[in-house]
Amino acid sequence: MKKKISNPFLLRGYISPDYFCDREDETTKLIELLRAGNNITLISTRRMGKTGLITHCFNNTAIQQEYYTFFVDIYATKTLRDFVFLLSKEILEKLKPFGKKAMDIFVQAMKSLQTGVSFDMAGTPSFNINVSDIQSSEKTLDEIFKYLKKADKPCIIAIDEFQQIDKYREDNVEALLRTHIQHCNNAQFIFAGSQHHTMGNMFLSAARPFYMSSDIMYLSSIPLDKYTKFAVQHFKRGGKKLLPEVMSAVYEQFEGITWYVQKVLNVLYGSTPQGSECNLDMLPWAYKNILNSNDYTYQEIIFRLPEKQQELLVAMAKEKTVRNPTSGEFVKKYKLQSASSVQSALRVLSEKDYITQEMGCHKIYDRFFALWLRENY
Ligand SMILES: Nc1ncnc2c1ncn2[C@@H]1O[C@H](COP(=O)(O)OP(=O)(O)OP(=O)(O)O)[C@@H](O)[C@H]1O
Ligand SMILES: [Mg+2]
């Protein structure tokens, strides 16, 4: 039976193509590239829909039939050991529906983890391991790649938040992974990450191991006409009406970035009674509602920041997009102390992910926070 959901504008996860808007060209392209044997780097502004697109492709029937698909989000990993642990678990978990034979090939390859393998009555293996059971990450990684080479189906491994490996404690992870990946012809990789400087540096700098190792796909916004059609249709299905101009306004406000658009649509849908129309008059209320629910968090963030960082953040919120925050013009316009103090505040705010740099421009990462700052300062 189909799961009944109360709001069709999902804010996390993936249910089915019904709740997934467009991305038809991107899906076709991604699948074609994979079929042609490429590795792919998927880059976008944050929250644009990279993870969603990967899940959508993995949900494709042909892909499911042809490949084993593995997905690891390595955002929370800090070491190669964490990475190896996560990937081993994911592989075993995903092989489960394919039965004992498929799992056995993997378990037998993972010689260094044998002590943590247990079998149920039917002889189906499972891992009972902790990160600390991994004695040598490099050895275990080696075993994973040995498995990938001899798996009984070709494999696709998506590594989400790939830029994280740049922060691993061990030094040579990038080169090590690159070597393994280069020699593995039964598996293809999708590296996904935000346009954050690290991801760009890893793949676009000639000095780095992953340079020229994959096809790079930039994910941009879902086109407004397609998004409007999707939104209007879902309102209609719920017995409500969405005026297209509302969609245009939301799209423009948040530069078409999927998560923000979804969030506003979700609130609008929830507050439009059945049989009623959602018009432009509802928008200010919807924004207020979202900002209010984040009010405490935003106040805390601001409260904890040193004054120079606060001032820079407010200035950037007001300016929206800043090409050169250390320019005399910007410093003067917002009465900031000096170019050098802006420089150091900018570095810290970027490290803390409050600010992102995209296409040479600086912006506040959380667009709702930017809106809140504009309204409150
Ligand atoms: N095509 C789509 N149709 C409808 N909703 C979508 C679509 N793509 C993504 N979303 C929704 O938008 C939000 C952000 O998507 P997702 O998490 O895939 O972005 P991301 O680029 O991986 O973000 P991050 O940079 O934070 O990892 C999620 O709530 C997801 O459910
Ligand atoms: Mg993601």
Image (spheres, rainbow, N blue to C red):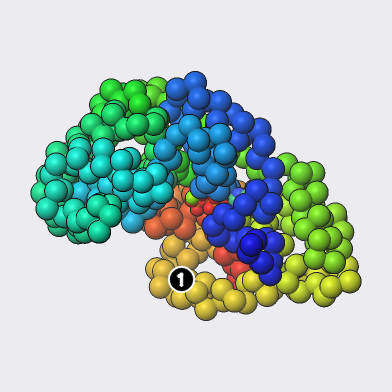
Instruction: Assign the C terminus to one quadrant of the image.
Output: bottom right
> Which one is in front, 290 or 238?
238
**With respect to residue 148, does 185 lie above or below?**
above
Give x and y (percent) for residue 353. 43, 55
Q: Residues within 10 Å of mark 1 (few under 14, many from 20)?
A: few
Give x and y (percent) for residue 43. 50, 38
Give x and y (percent) for residue 314. 55, 63
Using the rendered image of the protein, determine whether residue 102 is visible from the camera's viewpoint.
yes
Residue 348 placement: quadrant: bottom left
Give x and y (percent) for residue 36. 49, 21
> Which one is in front, 313 or 116?
116
The residue sitting at 40% across, 73% down in the picture is: 304
Task: Give the left or right position of residue 19, taking residue 66 as reference.
Answer: right
Say how many tags the image has: 1
> Which one is in front, 19 or 365?
19
- The secondary structure type at the circle numbered 1 is helix
Task: Give the left or right position of residue 220, taking residue 228 as reference.
Answer: left
Q: Which residue is mark 1?
A: 301
Instruction: Assign the N terminus to one quadrant of the image.
Output: bottom right
Using the rendered image of the protein, determine whether residue 344 is visible from the camera's viewpoint.
no
> Which one is in front, 154 or 8?
154
Q: Residue furthest front?
A: 122
